[in-house]
Image: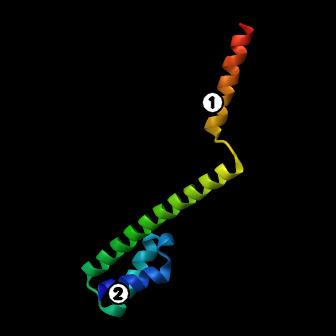
Amino acid sequence: MLELIEKVVMTTIGVAAITQKKAEELVSEMKERYKLSEEEGKHLVDRIQTLAKENREKVREMAEAEVHKVVERLGLVSAEEVERLKQRVQDLETRLKG
């Protein structure tokens, strides 16, 4: 029963955006409605937060991968690469002057 409630909750709230407070409010409502014990309620809050954290991490990883693809497709270079090239030019200029 608890697993079914968990699935419904996850689908309903969009797990990536839930806050601790919202999870606790939701579980409090679910505890009343479905007569969940305090332990079941705490377990559900913990599970919701774990899933939310995992999903946020997945979304972040996917976003980074997409940005990396776009940067490569556009032929852009990173700030690190620009700094490396600046240093190389500066080294070459120093050699030419010296």
**Which quadrant holds the C terminus?**
top right
Q: Which mark is residue 84?
A: 1
* Residue ID for mark 2: 4
Q: Give the x, y percent position of residue 23.
A: 42, 76
The structure's colour scheme is: rainbow
Look at discs 2 and 1 and give the one toward the viewer.
Answer: 1
Labelled pair 2, 1 in contact (Cβ < 8 Å): no
Residue type beneath disc 2: Leu
**Which quadrant holds the N terminus?**
bottom left
Residue visible at 49% across and 80% down in the picture = 13
16 above or below 76?
below
Residue visible at 70% across and 46% down in the picture = 75
Q: Name the residue nearer the viewer: 7 or 17.
A: 7
Q: What element carries label 2?
A: helix
- The image quadrant that residue 97 belongs to is top right
26 above or below 78?
below
Q: How crowded is mark 1: few (under 14 residues within 10 Å), some or many (20 or more)?
A: few
Q: Give the x, y percent position of residue 8.
A: 42, 86
Q: Give the x, y percent position of residue 54.
A: 42, 65
